[in-house]
DNA sequence: CTATAATGCAATATATATATTGCATTTTGT
DNA sequence: ACAAAATGCAATATATATATTGCATTATAG
């Protein structure tokens, strides 16, 4: 499923996908695909994204009820 | 770094690595290596582990200050 | 309305998470 | 002390996250 919370947190910091990608050291596509829910990032990448956006894992990546 | 919180949460539920592995649908080695901090699980796997242990991502996988 | 930036999408290539098997070592129960 | 279970470790194989490039589309600024 799409990760709206991530997108909101990113735009709240006035960052483009490309900006965030550079900060956390991945490609723009990776950020885009994560926001679109098209894949399953690694824990380390999630943590880096959280730090870049001043959030925690639960803030951005925890869904109370998830379907696949 | 080793994930002590994961190990503690697992033994608190009286589960072996193999038990937990079966519940979340991965191999025993995968659980063992995550506990030893020898790799970087996917977000989906982290979420499944959390659910199996009645914890959240922040409970098991968030470290306030991490070094690599 | 037009230029530019931001995002989506597709294809191929690479790195790495995960599976599998087998065995060694440690831990636990009796 | 012994048996059984739990864990660690190593090698090879596979699936998939991620990189890279290029182009199409959508949003934003002038």
Image: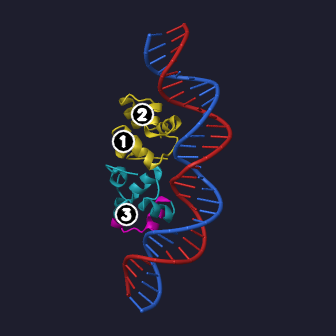
Chain colours: A yellow, B cyan, C red, D blue
**Residue A15 at x, y = what percent?**
41, 30
Vertical comparison of B21 with A26: above or below = below
Q: Which residue is mark 1?
A: A51
Q: Compared with residue B68, is residue D11 higher up or lower down, i.e. above or below?
A: below
The residue located at (41%, 43%) in the rendering is: A48
Q: Secondary structure at mark 2?
A: helix
Label 1 resides on the chain identified as A
Residue under label 3:
B7
Q: Which residue sits furthest front?
A: B68
Circle 1 crowding by C-alpha within 10 Å: few under 14, some 14–19, many from 20 = some
Q: Are marks 2 and 3 in contact (CB under 8 Å)?
A: no
For label 2, the residue is: A7
Neighbour tally class for label 3: few under 14, some 14-19, many 20 plus, Cα within 10 Å? some
Q: Secondary structure at mark 3?
A: helix
Q: Nearer the viewer, mark 3 or mark 1?
A: 1
Residue B31 in the magenta stretch? The answer is no
Q: Is residue A11 above or below residue B68?
A: above
Image-quadrant location for residue B54: bottom left
> Which segment is the magenta one?
B10-25
């Amino acid at each position: 499923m799409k990760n709206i919370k991530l997108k909101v947190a990113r735009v709240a910091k006035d960052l483009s996908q490309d900006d965030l990608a550079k900060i956390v050291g991945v490609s723009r596509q990776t950020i885009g695909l994560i926001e679109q829910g098209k894949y399953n990032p690694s824990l380390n990448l999630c943590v880096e994204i959280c730090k870049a956006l001043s959030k925690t894992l639960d803030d951005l990546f925890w869904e109370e009820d998830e379907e696949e």
